[in-house]
Amino acid sequence: QSLRVGLIPADGIGHEVIPAARDALLALGSSIPKPQFVDLLAGFDLFTRTGEALPEETVQALTNDCDCALFGAVSSPSQKVAGYTSPIVALRKKLDLYANIRPVSSVSEIPGQPPKVDLMVVRENTECLYVKQETMTTGEHGKEARATRLITERASRRIGKMAFEMALLRPKKQVTIIHKSNVLSVTDGLFRETVRGVPKLPEVAGKYDSVTIAEQIVDSAVYRLFREPEIFDVMVAPNLYGDILSDAAAALVGSLGLVPSVNAGDKFVMGEPVHGSAPDIAGKNIANPIAAIRSAALMLRHLGYPDGADRIDKAVDEVLRGDPLALTPDLGGKGTTKAVTDAILKLI
Ligand code: NAI
Ligand code: MG
């Protein structure tokens, strides 16, 4: 038995951190099925060389030859470039990766004690304002721009289920629904009602009885996230609120170089560090590999290998608790990508 892992470093520091994540999987030895890596192409660099950001071979290989994947980061130009669409956005669609799952936790000062921040944002990945149906008209008082916001029962139900599944795996077992249904009573109302209804669905009968449900209006959720992050466990949100909340939550733990994510569907899971391609530090061997390494662990957890995931996460925590000067410069240290990776691999 083997675990087939697609590797898509894409652009910039993706080429430095994805190999680190690959090596972390290899270091687990026989505690997971033997990983088989499939190197795949995508990204803006590729687009400038070949005119294609996401070759069909990459999509085919992921669909037919891989159980999961690790994605680095893409550089996206801020001006529109003819013919270019972001490969990560396209992959989420093509592989139906409807959930973006982002755990944000600080390292416990004392091993065994709960960390101060330990939460997870579960963001709906396919609809809300990101359906990108925008129009511009001219009215009596000048230009009028409109955007359609789509919330469906189907997407809300499946993201709700994902959130309850995630909560079952966590000690606190709490799901907080993030919404603004006091103002947007139709769209956010549907999201809130549908997620609330998930535990009562016949097909999950009783499964989520141990999970408590809370809810929070999105603006006060941000306020409380900064004041008292410890009140949150799993936060489930429509696409736009989830996008903003998950970056805000990442700020609570110091560096983008620490925060992992997975894009998950029912049939496929893709790990992806939250950071971008970091062109300012690319090629210098100083990128923090931890977000990518933790993304590999999160991917394993999702695939049902919690022991392997725990071993990676413990090794990372131990390195983070160790000599601060040995860490990468984003955390104030003088360490290199390679040295931090090697320290983690040794502990795994
Ligand atoms: P960024 O995340 O690439 O970098 C922001 C800052 O954080 C930079 O100073 C960078 O050096 C630092 N940083 C990021 N990751 C780090 C790591 N692992 N270790 C140490 N420092 C790290 O975001 P930015 O600069 O806004 O975007 C750069 C490019 O990345 C753009 O083309 C953007 O479109 C793309 N991007 C791609 C994402 C993705 O692939 N999902 C997400 C965010 C940005
Ligand atoms: Mg974002």
Image: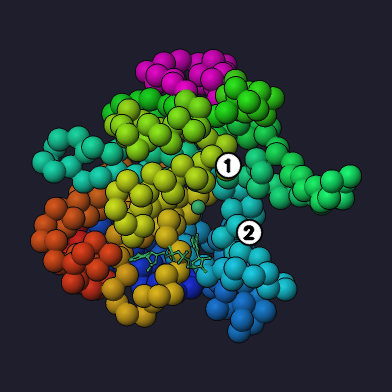
Residue wearing tag 2: 90
Q: Nearer the viewer, residue 123 or 299?
A: 123
120 left or right, relative to 196: left
Residue 122 to residue 289: above or below: above
Crowd tier of the residue under label 2, counting other residues whose Cα lies within 10 Å: few below 14, some 14–19, many 20 or above: some
180 left or right, relative to 296: right
Seen at 42% across and 70% down, the residue is 278
Q: Nearer the viewer, residue 242 or 264?
A: 242
Q: Which quadrant does ligand 1 occupy?
A: bottom left
Whichever of callouts 2 and 1 sits on the residue coming sooner in the sequence is 2
Stretch of the chain drawn in magenta:
195-215
Q: Amino acid under label 1? A: Asn
How far apart in space, not on screen, are marks 2 and 1 (Cα)?
16 Å
Q: Residue 235 appears at what percent x and percent y?
A: 44, 33
Seen at 47% across and 39% down, the residue is 122
Residue wearing tag 1: 239
Q: Residue 209 appears at what percent x and percent y?
A: 41, 16
- SS class, disc 2: helix
The quadrant the C terminus occupies is bottom left
